[in-house]
Image (cartoon, coloured by chain):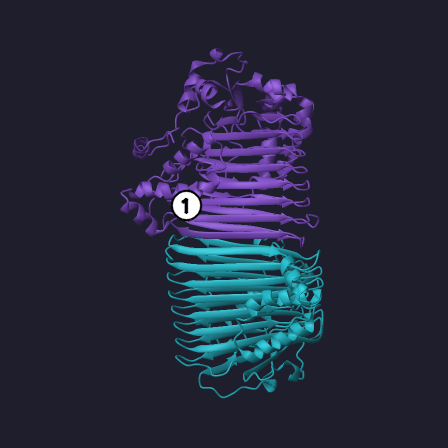
Amino acid sequence: MGYTEDELAKDLESQEYKFGFTSDFKADRAPDGINEDIIRFISAKKEEPEWLLEKRLQAYKAWMQMKEPEWAHVHYEKPSFQDICYYAAPEQTKKYESWDDVDPEMKETMSKLGISMEEQKKLTGTAVDFVMDSVSVATSFKKKLNELGIIFCSFSEAVQEYPELVKKHMGTVVPHQDNFYAALNSAVFTDGSFCYIPEGVTCPMELSTYFRINESGTGQFERTLVVAEKGAYVSYLEGCTAPMRDENQLHAAVVELVAKEDAEIKYSTVQNWYPGDKDGKGGVFNFVTKRGLCEKNAKISWTQVETGSAVTWKYPSCILKGDNSTGEFYSVAVTNNYQQADTGTKMVHLGKNTKSTIISKGISAGQSENSYRGLVQIHPKAENARNFSQCDSLLMTDRSGAHTFPYIECKNNSAKIEHEATTSKIGEDQIFYCKQRGIDEEKAIGLIVNGYCKEVLNKLPMEFAVEAQKLLEISLENSVG
Amino acid sequence: MEVAAENKVLSFVNGWERPTEENAVRKEALQALNAMEFPTTRVEDWKYTRVGKITKRSFKQLNTTIDTSPYIIEDLDAHQLVFVNGYYREDLSAIKKDDALTIQPVDRVDDAYYGQLVEDIDENVFSLMNKAYSNGGVYLHVAKQMKVEHPIHMIHVLTGDEVVANPRHFIRVEQGGKAEVVTTFQSEKAEESFSNVVMEGHVEANAHLRIHKVQTEAKNCFHIANELFVQDEGSQFLINTITTGSRLTRNGLNVIVEGENCHTEMNGAYLGTDRQHLDNHTLIDQLYSNCTSSETYKGVMDDKSVGVFNGKVIVRQDSQNIEAYQSNGNILLSKEATVNSKPELEIYADDVRCSHGSTTGQLDEEALFYLRTRGISEKNAKNLLVAAFIGDVLEKIDIEPLRKSVDQHFLEEFGWEF
C-alpha cells in the first residue's frame, strides 16, 4: 500500500498532528466581524456582479433571523461570529500561466501536504485546484479538460467567466435560507470550486481539490458547485488538512451537486481537519451543508472518510427528484480523544423507482462522541422506492459514545425500507486470534478496523483509499481501551 | 379555580376538580403545570405527533356508572378493578382474597419513597396534568417473596361526551414478588373523550412483573399514556401493548433499569385504520451492567392512518455487558397510510451488543400469489399474511382467555383470524 509498518510506527511515536504548521503569507484581511459592509467589501474584492451581491445580502438578512441549531448530539462553545475574519486572501493573487511562476513557499507548503504538483501531474493524472485560504492559486490540467469542454476552476473565476452557469445553478440545491450555516456561507463565502461537465462527457480523470485553513482566525467559507449535464460523469475528490491552532476555527462550507438526466456524480471526501489536542483543546468546527439533486436516471454517490475536526455536523444528502434516480452514501467516521461527530445523510425520495443505499461505519475512541443521524423520507408519489441502510458502530473504549438516530418517514405503501444498526466493540477473540499469529495488539486493531470499514473504503478512488487507510490507523493510535 | 387566560395548559384544565385531600405529588404537579406548555412538533420527542387535536378542545370530568358485563373477559379468572372515566369504582370491582396483594388508593404511596424513585425524571405536561387532577387510581402492592395467584384485570371504561379521564396507578412489586396485570381501555357511547393515563411501577430486586395493555377505545377519542417503571437488581419486567383504538394514541413508555442482571421486554402491536394516529414512544435506560432487553413493535397501517415508532435504548457509561435488541416492522396496506420510525441507540459503554432494525413495506407479492394459487381469495390471503405478521407479537400474550378476547376483537374489527 506504499505505507510500511515502520512508517506507521514512526507516526505513532509522534502523536502530534502531522499537518500542523502555518505558512507565512501576508494576507489581505478584512476587519473582524460580519455586517453588510463586510459583505459588500468581500463582493467588491471579488469584483462580483450585482446579482451575486444581492444574493449575499438576502442570505445575510435571512441569517440574521435564524438561530443556531441545537438538536445535534454535540456540545461546544458557540463561535462568536463577530470575532471571525470573513475575508483573507494570500497576497499573490495574480494568475499563473505556468507552474514555474508559483511562489516557492507555496510549493513548499504543498509538498508538506503531500500533494506535490509535479508528482500529482506525473503519477496520478489528477487535476488539482489548490485553495490556499480563500483564493485559489493554481489550477492544472486545465487545458486538457478544456478540450472536452469541462470547466473546473475556482468559484470566483467561474463567477467572472461563466456567470450565467453559476447564476442558473447556484442556490438551486441549497437555497440561501436553507439553514443557519448555509445562510452564513451564502452571505460571506469567499471562494471554492466550480465544476461543469457538458452533456454526454465522461470526465477522464478524478477531479480533486484540497482545502486548507491557513490564516489564523479566518473562518473558511467555501462553496462548491458541481454540475453534470445530461449523460455526463464525474468523480470528484475533496481532501482537507488544517494547521494546528489553539482557538476553535469555524468551517461552514456549502456543496451543491446537480446531476441532470442520466448523469452521475461521485463525490469523495477525506476530512482531516485539526481535531484538537489530547485534552480536547482547539480544533476545527466543521458545520457543512452538502446536498445533491438527481434528475431522471441520475446517480449521486457520496463517500466520506471523516477523521478530523473537533466538532462535525454534516449530512451529505440526495434529493432523488427524477424517476429511477439513485443516491448512495458510504461513510467512515472516526472520533478520538474529545472529538464529537454528528453525521449521516438524508435521502429524500420524490420520484418513482428511486433507490438509496446508506452504509455508515462509526468508530469511537478516547472520550469521543460519534452519532449517526440519517433521514430516509419516502414521499407519496415515490412509487416503488427502495432504501437499504446499515449503520454499524464500533466502540474502542469505555469512555466513548456511539449513537444511532435514524429517522424513517414513509408515505407510500409500495416502498421497501430496511434499516439495521449494530453497536459493539472489537471482539476479544478477534484480537486474540491476531496476537496468536504474532500480530501485536495495535496492528491487530488496525487490521480489524480496516476490515470493518472495507465496504466504504472500497468505494474510494485508489489514491484516496491508501490515504484513508493511513488516516484511520493514525487517528486510532493508542486508542485501545 | 381561577386561572390566567394566557397559559394554554391552565385554561385547558380550567374547571377540572381536584380531590380535597392534598399530597406532595399532587401539589408539585400542580405547581409545575404553571410553567408548562403543550409540546409542538418542534420538540424532538413530539416530532411526529401533533397534540393540537386534543389541546384545542375542552374536556370535563364525569363520575358515573356503567354496566361492567361487556368488559369482563370471558374465562379470565382475575381480580377485577373497574375505573369509569378514571374514577375507581370499588362498587363495580370484584377482588379476590389474596395475602400477596393489597389494593389502596394511589394517594397512599409514601411521598418520600415515591419522590426518591422518580427523582430526576422529566415529566411531560400530560403526566403532570394527570397527577394534579387525578381523581382515582390504585396503588397495587405485592408483598415480598409472594406471588399474586390470579391476574389483576384493570378495566378502564370511557363514557360520555367530551369527558376526560385521569386515572393514575402505581404498582409496587416488592423483593421477589410476582404479579401479572391486564389493563384494558375501552369506551362506551363516548364521543370525543380523552383518556390521560399515568401508570407507574417499581419492580424491586428479583421481582417479576408482567403487564398486558389492550387499548380499543372509540376512534373519535384520544388516548395519552405515560408509563414509567423502575427495575431493581435481578428483576424481570414485560409489557405488551396492543393498540387499535383512538383517533390519536400516544403510548409513552419508559423503563429505568437501576440494577444488574435485569431483563426487560417490550412488545407492541398497533393497527390503524381511517385517520388514526398511533404513536409508540419507548425508552429503556440501562444504568447498570449485565442486563438484557428486547423490544419488538409491529404496525399495520391502513386507510389514511399514521403509525409512529420511536424507541430509544440508552446504555450509560460503565454499564457493561449489555445486550439490547430492538426491532420495528411496519406494513402499509393503503396508498395514503404513513409510517414514521425512529429507532435510536445511545451507547456510552463499550462492552455491549446492541442492535436495532426497522423495516417498512407492503405485503409480499409472492406470498400473496402463493396463497391465491391455493384457491384462497385475495382478501383472505391478505388477512392471513397480516395476521401472521402481527401474530409474532400477540403470541407474547400468554394468558389464554385474554389472547382469545384479543383474537375475537381482531376478527370483529378487521376480519383477521389467528
User: Furthest-bottom residue in view?
Assistant: B97
Q: Is residue B357 above or below residue B202?
A: above
Q: Residue at x 46, y 14 (%)?
A: A103
Residue in view at x 32 percent, y 30 percent: A7
Which corner quadrant holds the N terminus of chain A? Answer: top left
Residue nearer the viewer, A314 or A60: A314
Q: Residue at x 66, y 60 (%)?
A: B369
Query: Which element type, helix, strand or loop, lies under badge 1?
Result: strand
Residue B392 lies, in percent from the top left, at: 55, 67
Amino acid carrying label 1: it is Ser
Q: Quadrant of residue B412?
A: bottom right
Label 1 Cα neighbours within 10 Å, binned few <14 / some 14-19 / many ≥20:
many
Give the letter of the purple chain.
A
- For chain B, give the colour: cyan
The answer to whether residue A324 is left or right of residue A125 is right
Comparing B44 with A112, the one in front is A112
Please determine whether, in this image, residue A185 is positioned above or below residue B227. above
**In the rendered image, the vertical position of residue A338 relative to residue B331, given as above or below:** above
Q: Which of the 4 quarters of the picture holds residue A298?
A: top right
Q: For residue A226, what is the image quadrant?
A: top right
How many marks the image carries: the answer is: 1
Residue position for label 1 = A364
- Residue B284 in view in this figure: yes
Query: Percent position (x, y) of residue B262?
Result: 41, 66
Residue A247 can be seen, yes or no:
no
Residue A222 location (% of width, % of height): 55, 29
Write down the chain letter for disc 1: A
Q: Position of residue A121 (x, y in %)?
A: 48, 19
